[in-house]
Amino acid sequence: MKAAVVVFPGSNCDRDLAVAFEQAGFDVSMVWHKDSALPEGVDIVGVPGGFSYGDYLRCGAIAAQSPICKAVIEHADRGGYAIGVCNGFQILTETGVLPGALLRNAGLKYICRTVDLKVTTSDSVFTQGYNAGDVIGVPIAHHDGNYFADADTVKALQDQDRVAFTYEDNPNGSMADIAGILSENRRVLGMMPHPERAADEGHGGTDGTAMFRALAGMVTAA
Amino acid sequence: MKARVHVMLKNGVLDPQGEAVRHALGALGFDKVEGVRQGKVIDLDLSEGATEADVTAMCEKLLANTVIESYSIEMA
Protein backbone atom coordinates (compact mmCIF):
# COMPACT_ATOMS: atom_id res chain seq x y z
CA MET A 1 0.00 0.00 0.00
CA LYS A 2 1.56 3.21 -1.15
CA ALA A 3 0.55 6.74 -0.31
CA ALA A 4 2.08 9.94 -1.61
CA VAL A 5 1.83 13.23 0.25
CA VAL A 6 2.38 16.38 -1.79
CA VAL A 7 4.56 19.08 -0.24
CA PHE A 8 4.19 22.69 -1.38
CA PRO A 9 6.15 25.66 -0.09
CA GLY A 10 3.98 26.61 2.88
CA SER A 11 2.47 23.18 3.54
CA ASN A 12 2.42 22.53 7.28
CA CYS A 13 0.28 19.41 7.75
CA ASP A 14 2.24 17.23 5.34
CA ARG A 15 4.10 15.30 8.02
CA ASP A 16 0.98 14.85 10.16
CA LEU A 17 -0.83 13.41 7.15
CA ALA A 18 2.14 11.14 6.37
CA VAL A 19 2.19 9.83 9.96
CA ALA A 20 -1.55 9.11 9.85
CA PHE A 21 -1.06 7.11 6.63
CA GLU A 22 1.97 5.30 8.10
CA GLN A 23 0.08 4.34 11.24
CA ALA A 24 -2.57 2.78 9.02
CA GLY A 25 0.11 0.71 7.32
CA PHE A 26 0.95 2.74 4.20
CA ASP A 27 4.43 3.28 2.78
CA VAL A 28 4.49 7.02 2.33
CA SER A 29 6.53 9.06 -0.13
CA MET A 30 6.71 12.83 0.10
CA VAL A 31 6.37 14.43 -3.32
CA TRP A 32 7.72 17.93 -4.01
CA HIS A 33 5.57 20.48 -5.81
CA LYS A 34 8.06 20.79 -8.66
CA ASP A 35 7.95 17.07 -9.41
CA SER A 36 5.92 16.35 -12.48
CA ALA A 37 5.02 12.73 -11.72
CA LEU A 38 3.76 10.72 -8.76
CA PRO A 39 5.81 7.70 -7.68
CA GLU A 40 5.00 4.51 -9.56
CA GLY A 41 2.11 2.49 -8.10
CA VAL A 42 0.73 5.10 -5.72
CA ASP A 43 -2.63 3.95 -4.30
CA ILE A 44 -3.68 7.24 -2.75
CA VAL A 45 -2.50 10.84 -2.87
CA GLY A 46 -2.76 13.17 0.12
CA VAL A 47 -2.91 16.91 -0.47
CA PRO A 48 -2.13 18.41 2.93
CA GLY A 49 -3.15 21.50 4.83
CA GLY A 50 -1.09 24.64 5.19
CA PHE A 51 -0.64 27.85 3.27
CA SER A 52 0.70 26.76 -0.09
CA TYR A 53 2.51 29.62 -1.85
CA GLY A 54 1.50 31.91 1.01
CA ASP A 55 -2.18 31.73 -0.01
CA TYR A 56 -1.30 34.44 -2.57
CA LEU A 57 -4.01 35.37 -5.08
CA ARG A 58 -6.52 32.87 -3.61
CA CYS A 59 -6.01 29.92 -1.26
CA GLY A 60 -4.78 27.03 -3.38
CA ALA A 61 -4.85 28.94 -6.69
CA ILE A 62 -1.14 28.86 -7.40
CA ALA A 63 -0.65 25.33 -6.03
CA ALA A 64 -3.37 24.17 -8.42
CA GLN A 65 -1.15 25.24 -11.34
CA SER A 66 2.00 23.51 -10.03
CA PRO A 67 3.62 20.65 -11.98
CA ILE A 68 2.69 18.02 -9.37
CA CYS A 69 -0.96 19.10 -9.46
CA LYS A 70 -1.14 18.19 -13.13
CA ALA A 71 -0.07 14.68 -12.10
CA VAL A 72 -2.63 14.66 -9.26
CA ILE A 73 -5.40 15.70 -11.69
CA GLU A 74 -4.38 12.93 -14.10
CA HIS A 75 -4.32 10.45 -11.21
CA ALA A 76 -7.87 11.48 -10.22
CA ASP A 77 -9.03 11.40 -13.85
CA ARG A 78 -7.75 7.81 -14.12
CA GLY A 79 -9.93 6.89 -11.14
CA GLY A 80 -7.15 7.18 -8.54
CA TYR A 81 -7.87 7.87 -4.87
CA ALA A 82 -7.02 11.20 -3.27
CA ILE A 83 -7.75 13.12 -0.11
CA GLY A 84 -7.35 16.88 0.28
CA VAL A 85 -7.47 18.33 3.78
CA CYS A 86 -7.97 22.03 4.51
CA ASN A 87 -5.63 23.81 2.07
CA GLY A 88 -5.63 20.51 0.18
CA PHE A 89 -9.42 20.79 -0.21
CA GLN A 90 -9.00 24.37 -1.45
CA ILE A 91 -6.41 23.16 -3.97
CA LEU A 92 -8.66 20.34 -5.22
CA THR A 93 -11.52 22.80 -5.82
CA GLU A 94 -9.12 25.18 -7.61
CA THR A 95 -8.03 22.35 -9.92
CA GLY A 96 -11.66 21.49 -10.65
CA VAL A 97 -11.23 17.93 -9.33
CA LEU A 98 -13.92 18.82 -6.78
CA PRO A 99 -16.75 21.32 -7.36
CA GLY A 100 -17.29 24.62 -5.56
CA ALA A 101 -14.90 26.96 -3.78
CA LEU A 102 -13.86 27.92 -0.25
CA LEU A 103 -14.58 31.53 0.70
CA ARG A 104 -13.41 33.61 3.65
CA ASN A 105 -15.14 32.48 6.87
CA ALA A 106 -18.42 34.34 7.30
CA GLY A 107 -17.24 35.66 10.69
CA LEU A 108 -13.93 36.80 9.12
CA LYS A 109 -11.95 35.11 11.87
CA TYR A 110 -9.41 32.32 11.66
CA ILE A 111 -10.95 29.45 13.65
CA CYS A 112 -8.85 26.79 15.37
CA ARG A 113 -10.79 24.32 17.51
CA THR A 114 -12.30 20.87 17.54
CA VAL A 115 -15.78 20.75 16.04
CA ASP A 116 -18.52 18.15 15.88
CA LEU A 117 -18.86 16.64 12.43
CA LYS A 118 -21.70 14.49 11.27
CA VAL A 119 -20.73 11.63 8.97
CA THR A 120 -23.30 12.12 6.23
CA THR A 121 -22.57 8.98 4.23
CA SER A 122 -20.66 5.79 4.92
CA ASP A 123 -20.67 4.98 1.20
CA SER A 124 -17.02 5.76 0.40
CA VAL A 125 -13.65 4.23 1.23
CA PHE A 126 -13.00 7.26 3.42
CA THR A 127 -16.15 7.04 5.53
CA GLN A 128 -16.94 3.31 5.53
CA GLY A 129 -15.36 3.01 8.99
CA TYR A 130 -18.20 5.12 10.39
CA ASN A 131 -21.95 4.82 10.37
CA ALA A 132 -23.96 7.50 8.61
CA GLY A 133 -25.20 9.80 11.35
CA ASP A 134 -22.16 9.30 13.61
CA VAL A 135 -20.90 12.51 15.17
CA ILE A 136 -17.11 12.74 15.48
CA GLY A 137 -14.80 15.37 16.93
CA VAL A 138 -12.23 16.68 14.45
CA PRO A 139 -10.15 19.88 14.63
CA ILE A 140 -10.57 22.71 12.17
CA ALA A 141 -7.93 25.38 11.60
CA HIS A 142 -8.82 27.73 8.77
CA HIS A 143 -9.60 31.26 7.67
CA ASP A 144 -11.17 30.30 4.34
CA GLY A 145 -13.37 27.29 4.94
CA ASN A 146 -16.73 28.70 3.92
CA TYR A 147 -17.89 26.20 1.29
CA PHE A 148 -19.66 27.80 -1.65
CA ALA A 149 -21.19 26.32 -4.77
CA ASP A 150 -24.18 27.34 -6.85
CA ALA A 151 -27.54 25.97 -5.77
CA ASP A 152 -27.63 23.32 -8.52
CA THR A 153 -24.21 22.00 -7.51
CA VAL A 154 -25.14 21.80 -3.82
CA LYS A 155 -28.36 19.99 -4.73
CA ALA A 156 -26.47 17.56 -6.95
CA LEU A 157 -23.98 16.85 -4.13
CA GLN A 158 -26.87 16.12 -1.78
CA ASP A 159 -28.90 14.10 -4.30
CA GLN A 160 -25.87 11.98 -5.21
CA ASP A 161 -24.99 11.40 -1.54
CA ARG A 162 -21.64 13.13 -2.08
CA VAL A 163 -21.64 15.26 1.07
CA ALA A 164 -19.25 13.29 3.27
CA PHE A 165 -19.38 15.43 6.42
CA THR A 166 -21.48 18.31 7.72
CA TYR A 167 -20.86 20.61 10.68
CA GLU A 168 -23.23 20.12 13.61
CA ASP A 169 -22.79 23.81 14.48
CA ASN A 170 -21.70 25.62 11.31
CA PRO A 171 -18.57 27.61 12.27
CA ASN A 172 -17.79 29.35 8.98
CA GLY A 173 -20.94 29.97 6.93
CA SER A 174 -20.55 26.95 4.63
CA MET A 175 -23.55 26.27 2.42
CA ALA A 176 -25.70 23.44 3.73
CA ASP A 177 -23.22 23.07 6.64
CA ILE A 178 -20.87 21.25 4.24
CA ALA A 179 -17.49 20.27 5.74
CA GLY A 180 -16.39 17.68 3.19
CA ILE A 181 -17.44 16.37 -0.22
CA LEU A 182 -16.75 13.45 -2.52
CA SER A 183 -16.01 13.40 -6.23
CA GLU A 184 -18.56 11.88 -8.58
CA ASN A 185 -16.74 8.50 -8.52
CA ARG A 186 -16.47 8.81 -4.69
CA ARG A 187 -12.69 8.30 -4.84
CA VAL A 188 -11.63 11.86 -4.05
CA LEU A 189 -12.50 13.44 -0.71
CA GLY A 190 -12.00 17.10 0.15
CA MET A 191 -12.63 18.31 3.68
CA MET A 192 -11.76 21.37 5.76
CA PRO A 193 -11.44 19.58 9.14
CA HIS A 194 -8.20 17.72 9.89
CA PRO A 195 -8.71 13.95 10.46
CA GLU A 196 -4.90 13.58 10.65
CA ARG A 197 -4.98 15.75 13.77
CA ALA A 198 -7.37 13.33 15.45
CA ALA A 199 -5.43 10.16 14.77
CA ASP A 200 -3.29 9.67 17.89
CA GLU A 201 -3.96 9.58 21.63
CA GLY A 202 -1.58 12.52 21.97
CA HIS A 203 -3.86 14.63 19.77
CA GLY A 204 -6.58 14.55 22.40
CA GLY A 205 -8.90 12.53 20.19
CA THR A 206 -8.75 9.64 17.75
CA ASP A 207 -11.98 10.01 15.80
CA GLY A 208 -10.01 10.42 12.57
CA THR A 209 -8.25 7.05 12.91
CA ALA A 210 -11.19 5.12 11.45
CA MET A 211 -10.77 6.98 8.16
CA PHE A 212 -7.12 6.04 7.66
CA ARG A 213 -7.70 2.47 8.89
CA ALA A 214 -10.57 2.03 6.46
CA LEU A 215 -8.41 3.25 3.59
CA ALA A 216 -5.79 0.60 4.25
CA GLY A 217 -6.29 -2.31 1.93
CA MET A 218 -9.24 -0.70 0.15
CA VAL A 219 -7.49 1.69 -2.20
CA THR A 220 -5.72 0.45 -5.30
CA ALA A 221 -3.38 2.13 -7.71
CA ALA A 222 -4.83 3.74 -10.83
CA MET B 1 1.52 47.76 -23.01
CA LYS B 2 -0.54 47.38 -19.90
CA ALA B 3 -3.72 45.70 -18.82
CA ARG B 4 -5.75 46.17 -15.68
CA VAL B 5 -7.88 43.28 -14.43
CA HIS B 6 -10.66 43.82 -11.92
CA VAL B 7 -11.73 40.72 -10.02
CA MET B 8 -14.91 40.86 -7.95
CA LEU B 9 -16.95 38.25 -6.11
CA LYS B 10 -20.03 37.50 -8.18
CA ASN B 11 -23.36 38.94 -7.17
CA GLY B 12 -25.00 36.57 -4.75
CA VAL B 13 -21.69 35.39 -3.28
CA LEU B 14 -21.40 36.59 0.30
CA ASP B 15 -18.56 39.09 0.73
CA PRO B 16 -17.84 39.13 4.48
CA GLN B 17 -14.91 41.53 4.04
CA GLY B 18 -17.11 44.02 2.21
CA GLU B 19 -19.69 43.65 4.97
CA ALA B 20 -17.06 44.34 7.63
CA VAL B 21 -15.98 47.48 5.77
CA ARG B 22 -19.62 48.59 5.52
CA HIS B 23 -20.04 48.17 9.29
CA ALA B 24 -16.83 50.08 9.96
CA LEU B 25 -17.93 52.94 7.72
CA GLY B 26 -21.26 53.03 9.55
CA ALA B 27 -19.46 53.14 12.88
CA LEU B 28 -17.48 56.15 11.62
CA GLY B 29 -20.72 57.99 10.92
CA PHE B 30 -20.87 57.47 7.15
CA ASP B 31 -24.55 56.66 7.24
CA LYS B 32 -25.23 56.75 3.50
CA VAL B 33 -23.38 53.52 2.68
CA GLU B 34 -25.85 50.80 1.77
CA GLY B 35 -23.44 48.16 0.56
CA VAL B 36 -19.73 47.49 0.07
CA ARG B 37 -18.16 44.89 -2.22
CA GLN B 38 -14.43 44.39 -2.05
CA GLY B 39 -12.36 43.07 -4.95
CA LYS B 40 -8.90 42.99 -6.43
CA VAL B 41 -7.12 45.03 -9.06
CA ILE B 42 -4.29 43.28 -10.90
CA ASP B 43 -2.03 45.37 -13.18
CA LEU B 44 -0.14 43.51 -15.86
CA ASP B 45 2.86 44.80 -17.83
CA LEU B 46 2.68 43.03 -21.17
CA SER B 47 5.03 42.79 -24.10
CA GLU B 48 3.98 44.27 -27.46
CA GLY B 49 1.45 42.23 -29.32
CA ALA B 50 -0.34 40.84 -26.28
CA THR B 51 -4.07 40.85 -26.84
CA GLU B 52 -7.16 41.05 -24.70
CA ALA B 53 -7.73 37.40 -25.59
CA ASP B 54 -4.41 36.58 -23.90
CA VAL B 55 -5.52 38.38 -20.74
CA THR B 56 -8.91 36.65 -20.86
CA ALA B 57 -7.10 33.31 -20.94
CA MET B 58 -5.02 34.38 -17.91
CA CYS B 59 -8.20 35.30 -16.04
CA GLU B 60 -9.91 32.03 -16.86
CA LYS B 61 -6.88 29.93 -15.93
CA LEU B 62 -5.53 31.69 -12.87
CA LEU B 63 -6.40 35.29 -12.04
CA ALA B 64 -10.08 34.68 -11.28
CA ASN B 65 -11.92 31.65 -9.94
CA THR B 66 -15.02 31.82 -12.08
CA VAL B 67 -16.96 29.64 -9.64
CA ILE B 68 -17.10 32.62 -7.29
CA GLU B 69 -15.57 35.59 -9.10
CA SER B 70 -16.24 37.71 -12.18
CA TYR B 71 -13.59 39.77 -13.91
CA SER B 72 -13.28 42.67 -16.31
CA ILE B 73 -10.28 43.74 -18.36
CA GLU B 74 -9.07 47.20 -19.39
CA MET B 75 -6.35 47.26 -22.04
CA ALA B 76 -4.18 50.40 -22.16
Image (tube, grey):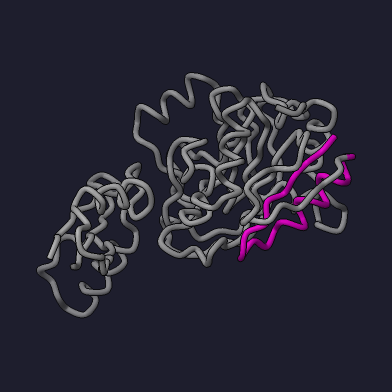
Relative placement, left or right, of B8 versus A116 is left
Which residue occupies 56% across, 37% down?
A73
Q: Position of residue A102 (x, y in %)?
A: 45, 49
Relative placement, left or right, of B74 versus A186 is left
A86 inside magenta stretch: no
Which residue occupies 61% across, 40% down?
A72
Query: Does B70 sit above or below residue A72?
Result: below
Relative placement, left or right, of A190 versus A122 is left
Magenta stretch, residue numbers: A1-25
The residue closer to the viewer here, A139 or B58, is: B58
Quadrant the N terminus of chain A occupies = top right
Q: Position of residue A79 (x, y in %)?
A: 63, 25
Quadrant the C terminus of chain A occupies = top right
Query: Does B62 sit above or below residue A25?
Result: below
The residue closer to the viewer here, A214 or A98, is: A98
Which residue occupies 83% across, 32% down?
A216
